[in-house]
Image (cartoon, rainbow, N blue to C red):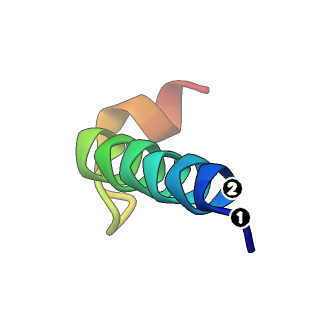
Amino acid sequence: MSLCAAQRDARLAQLVEHYLDTVGVTGSSPVLRTI
């Protein structure tokens, strides 16, 4: 894997983690119920 691809994957994983933290991983967040 190239360095650029590794950096992109790391950034994507960071975004996913941030999103999960925002909506709540447990699914107890009201945001999930309103979708």
- Residue 28: image x %, image y %? 29, 56
- Residue 29: image x %, image y %? 29, 44
Indicate the secondary structure of the residue bearing disc 1: loop
Mark 1 vs mark 2: in front: 1
For disc 1, the marked residue is 2
User: Is 8 placed left or right of 17 in the picture?
Assistant: right
Of the 4 image quadrants, the one containing the C terminus is top right
Closer-to-camera residue (19/32) = 19
Of the 4 image quadrants, the one containing the N terminus is bottom right
CA gap, disc 1 to disc 2? 5 Å
Rendered residue at 39%/30% (across/down):
31
Contact between marks 1 and 2 (CB within 8 A): the answer is yes
**Residue furthest front as drawn:** 2
For disc 2, the marked residue is 5
Closer-to-camera residue (15/35) = 15
34 is higher (above) or lower (below) than 22: above
User: Is 22 placed left or right of 4 in the picture?
Assistant: left
**Residue furthest bottom as drawn:** 1
- Residue 32: image x %, image y %? 48, 39
15 is higher (above) or lower (below) than 1: above
Rendered residue at 30%/44% (across/down):
18
- Residue 14: image x %, image y %? 37, 51
Q: How many other residues sit within 10 Å of disc 2, few (<14), some (14-19) or many (≥20)?
A: few
26 is higher (above) or lower (below) than 20: below
